[in-house]
Amino acid sequence: MSVFLYLPERRRVAAAAGVAAALALALASCGSGTEHSSMPGTRHGSSATASVPGGFNEADVAFAQMMIPHHEQAVSMAELADGRASDREIKSLAADIEKAQGPEINTMRGWLRSWGKSPSPSMDHGMPGMDHGGETAMPGMMSGKAMAGLKAAKGEDFDRRFAELMIGHHEGAVTMAGDERKNGRSPAARKLAGAVVRTQQAEIGTMHKILDRL
């Protein structure tokens, strides 16, 4: 009877020893995995992931800072069409400009906030977009005099002025967007620049056709 009781006890001891050995092996394996995480290949993967979000350069900042007031002026021009434009296509085009460029302004402001940059270009004398003596340095931006003339126009006179001025304004935006596509780093900013080029070039073509029939 005493032998019968002794054998199970030995089995229990052996089982416990087996569990302890398995646990020790598992802990050793975990320690080995931790050491592998410091290998050059692992560090490279971690570094690559960390460098992707938020990547931008000065060209991206300049694009957003300059395109915001550029878009704002286009929206102001488009808003004047209400009650002044007589051509159906001009009215439709003005509505499209408001619908597209308003949200783009908000998007670019968001980028600048996330980058820790001012939402507006420097107000220093001579900076692009500043109006000096009726002339502007930013591509396509209208002078105060030209804007006042558009505001005073009505009917077909407004339609023609709007198309002529907006063509120049769009051409300036296309130039700025082209610079961003070549020199920018931010994928989001470069994507928006591509959309500006495609959309505004198409609208330029539409406005040339409108002028041909007015």
Image: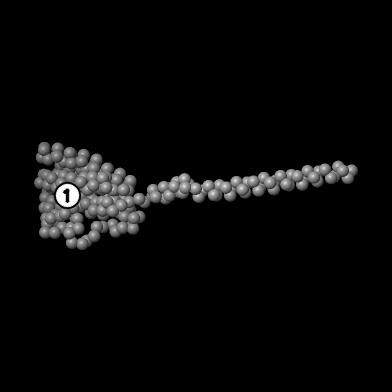
**Residue 196 image position (x, y, % from top left):** 25, 44
Res. 3 image quadrant: top right
**Residue 186 image position (x, y, % from top left):** 32, 48
Give the residue at the far front of this rendering.
40
Q: Which residue is mark 1?
A: 140
Q: Is 121 displayed left or right of 38 in the figure?
A: left
**Residue 93 image position (x, y, % from top left):** 20, 43
User: In this picture, is 112 found above or below 45?
Assistant: below
Q: Is 1 displayed left or right of 159 in the figure?
A: right
Q: From the viewer's side, name the closer residue of 93 and 62.
A: 62
Q: Count the labels in the image.
A: 1
**Residue 195 image position (x, y, % from top left):** 27, 43
Give the residue at the far bottom of this rendering.
124
Q: Is residue 190 visible?
A: yes
Q: From the viewer's side, name the closer residue of 133 and 181.
A: 181
Res. 6 image quadrant: top right
> The residue under label 1 is which amino acid type?
Gly
* Crowding near the residue tagged with mark 1, few <14, some 14–19, many ≥20 C-alpha atoms within 10 Å: many
Res. 206 image quadrant: top left
Q: Is residue 95 visible?
A: no
Q: Residue at x 14, y 47 (%)?
A: 165
Q: Secondary structure at mark 1?
A: loop
Q: Residue at x 18, y 45 (%)?
A: 171
Q: Residue at x 34, y 55 (%)?
A: 115
Q: Quadrant of the C terminus?
A: top left
Q: Quadrant of the N terminus?
A: top right
Q: From the viewer's side, name the closer residue of 81 and 27.
A: 27
Q: Residue at x 80, y 45 (%)?
A: 10
Give the residue at the far right of this rendering.
1
Q: Is 53 displayed left or right of 18 in the figure?
A: left
